Amino acid sequence: MPIRSLSQVMRPLTKFDESFLWEMLYHALYVPEGSAPFSKEIVNQPDIAKYVLGWGRPGDMGFVAIDKTSRLQVGAVWIRLFNSHNPGYGYVAEGIPELSIAMLPGYRNLGFGTQLLSHMLAKATEQFSGLSLSVTSENPARRLYERFGFRLVGVSGSSLTMLLEFSQADTGPSTS
């Protein structure tokens, strides 16, 4: 299905965007339909907070989507390097950053996430050999990641670890 033209701009995340990134971290947490949302304080748990805490360290890269009409920041995509002593949920190897992406609820399923992910992959290929992520098996975003070539490399309960190796991928969604 073709994605309609969207009225958005993207710009790099900076250390001054950390408060917005905390909000996006909260929205990145998958809540199954019909389930109660998490408390906003969940992002302060160390295993979740490490995805944003001290944003702007070496290896951090991200972009914010801004709706041209409202001029609101509506989503973000970011990557962060972890190591075997402090792995993220989707950790696969040192030197492979872990990807996070989120949209404000009113901007989901409109193509903004696809555009953000495309932009991130185009930029990340300049520095890294791949990206990893963790996604709950029921999360509809899983289909987006699969369209871009992420493949399953690990399972822990209902959480899937996926990897995209740039040498084997392009940076756009497949049409198949």
Image (tube, rainbow, N blue to C red):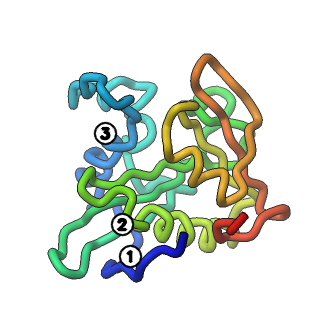
Other residues around mark 1 within 10 Å, as few (<14) / some (14–19) / many (≥20) = some
Q: Are marks 1 and 2 in contact (CB under 8 Å)?
A: yes
SS for tag 2? strand
Query: In what element is the residue under mark 1?
Result: strand
Name the residue rendered at 39%, 36% in the picture.
29
| Image location (x, y in percent) of residue 55 | 39, 51
Residue 46: % across, % down: 40, 25
Circle 3 is placed at which residue position?
A: 26
Q: For the residue labelled by badge 3, is the local secondary structure a helix, a strand or a loop?
A: helix
In the image shown, does 78 or 71 lie closer to the viewer?
71
- The one nearer the camera, 62 or 160, is 160
Name the amino acid type tagged 2: Val
Closer to the camera in the image, 126 or 150:
150
Q: Nearer the viewer, residue 102 or 58?
A: 102
Left or right: 33 in relation to 20: right
The C terminus lies in quadrant: bottom right
Where residue 69 appears, as percent x and y from the top left, is 18, 80
**Label 1 to label 3: alpha-carbon separation:** 20 Å
Q: Relative to 150, does residue 85 appear above or below in the rendering?
A: above
Say if mark 2 contacts mark 3, CB within 8 Å: no
Label 2, residues with CA under 10 Å away: few <14, some 14-19, many ≥20: many
Q: Amino acid at mark 1?
A: Met
Residue denoted by label 2: 64
C-alpha gap between disc 1 and disc 2: 5 Å
Task: Please identify the quarter of the rendering in which residue 71 is found.
Answer: bottom left
Residue drawn at 58 percent across, 27 percent down: 159
Mark 3: amino acid: Tyr
Residue 84 placement (x, y as % from top left): 68, 30
| Residue at the farthest front position | 1
Vertical placement of 29 versus 34: above or below? below
Residue at the image point whose x is 35% and y is 24% from the top: 45
